Amino acid sequence: MKRSNKPIFWALFGAGGMLSALVGPMLIFITGLAVPLGWLDRETMRYERVLAFAQSGAGKLAIVAVISLFLFHGCHRMYHCLHDFGIHVGRGLKAAFHGFAAAGTVAAIVLVLAV
Amino acid sequence: MTRTIRIECLRYHPETDAEPRLQAYEVPFTDDMSVLQGLQYIKDHLDGSLTFRWSCRMAICGSCGQMVNGVPRLGCETFLREFWPGTVRVEPLEHFPIVRDLAIDQSDFLAKLESVKPYLVQKAPPAGENTNLQAPEEMQAYYRYSKCINYLLCYAACPQYGLNPAFTGPAALTLLHRYNADSRDAGRAQRMPVVNQEDGVWGCTLVGYCSEVCPKDVDPARAVNQNKVNSTLDYFKHFLFPRAKEKS
C-alpha cells in the first residue's frame, strides 16, 4: 500500500485553519476597519511602527506565517471544494493550487527579508 | 386506527430487468408500524416476490438499512406514520450494486473490513500477569466506535465513496480506529498502512454526513479525522527516522 503525501498539505492546511480562525477576523477588524475608521488610535498603524514590526525577527516570522499558511489553507480548501462539487481536477490543477500557495510563500519570504 | 399509505419500492432483478423501476403498493398501517413492517405486509399480502433483508426488527442486527425517501435509514426504526399522508419511497442503499430489489451486494465493504484487521491483535500481558487488564478510562477511548454494527448507512451517505469506490470508507476506518485505540491491542503497525494510503483516511474530505445518519451515534467522521492526525504524525516520524522499526 502506497503511503499518501497528503499529510504535508493537510498539516499546512490544518495550521492555516487554526491560525486564520484565531487571528484572521481580528487582523481584518484592526487593519481594515478599526484603524481606518478611527475606532482605534491611528498611530497604531503608523508607517514607522509597521516598518519596525516588519524589520524585527518576530515580525518577519509573523508576516510570513500569516501569508503562507492562509494561502495553503485557502488553496487546499478550494481544491477539495471543486472535488465535492463534482469537478474532478487532476494533478495539474492540484499542483497549480499548491504551487500558488508555495509561490506566495516564497514571495513573502523574499519581500520580508528585503524590508 | 388503520390508515393506508402508498409505499413505492425499487424493483430490480439484474438477470431479467433492463433497468430498475419503482412499484407502488397501498399498505394499511397502524401508528406503531415501521417501514420494515410495511415491506413485510407487502411480501405477505400483496407481492411475495419483493426482496429485502431484515432480521432483528429492533436496530441491532445491521440488516435493514435502506434509502427511505432518499435518506439512508433503518427500516425497523423508521415509522410509516412519519410520512402519511405522503408517499414512502424505499430504495436500496446508494453506492452499492443491487443483488435484487432492496438487497445490496456488501462484498466490497466486507473485503475492506477484513483489510483493517477488525479484531484484537493480542498484546503480551505485563510480566507476572496472564491477562491485559483495562481501566474504564481506557475503555472509553474506543467504546463509542465499538458500537458500529455495519449497517452501511454511512457508506450510502458518503459522497467520497460514491465518487471513488476504492475509498476505504467510514465504517471500516472507524473499526480500524476502534482496535488501534484499544490498550490491549498490538496491531497498530499492521493497520497504519491502510490509514496512510491515498484511499485510506485521505479519501475523506470531512463532509460529516456519515455521522449524521449513523443510528448508533458512532461518529465515524470523528474517528476518520482523528486518524488524519495519526497518519500525519506517522508520516513525519517515518520521514525523520525512515529506518526506525514501526512500534505498535
Image: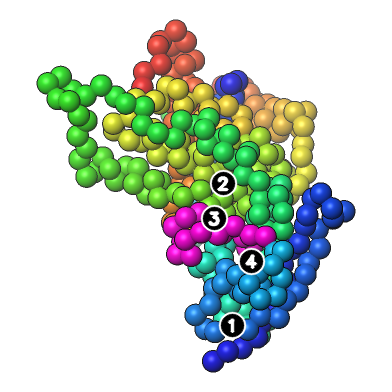
Nearer the N terminus, badge 4 or badge 3?
Answer: 3
At numbered mark 2, what does the secondary structure look like: helix, strand or loop?
Answer: loop
Using the numbered discs, state the Cα–Cα distance from disc 2 to disc 4 in whole angstroms. Answer: 24 Å
Pointer 3 residue: B63
Q: Which mark is residue B206?
A: 2
Q: Vertically, is A50 above or below B124?
A: below
Pointer 3 and pointer 1 on the same chain = yes
Q: Residue furthest right?
A: B18
Using the numbered discs, state the Cα–Cα distance from disc 2 to disc 1 in whole angstroms. Answer: 39 Å
Front-most of A76 and B115? B115
- Residues in magenta, as a range: B51-72
Residue A97, position as x, y percentages in the image: 71, 33
At numbered mark 4, what does the secondary structure look like: helix, strand or loop?
Answer: strand
Q: Which mark is residue B68?
A: 4
Quadrant in which the C terminus of chain B appears: top left
Pointer 2 and pointer 1 on the same chain = yes
Using the numbered discs, state the Cα–Cα distance from disc 3 to disc 1 in whole angstroms. Answer: 22 Å
Nearer the N terminus, badge 2 or badge 1?
Answer: 1
Looking at the picture, which amino acid does disc 3 mark? Ser
Pointer 1 residue: B29
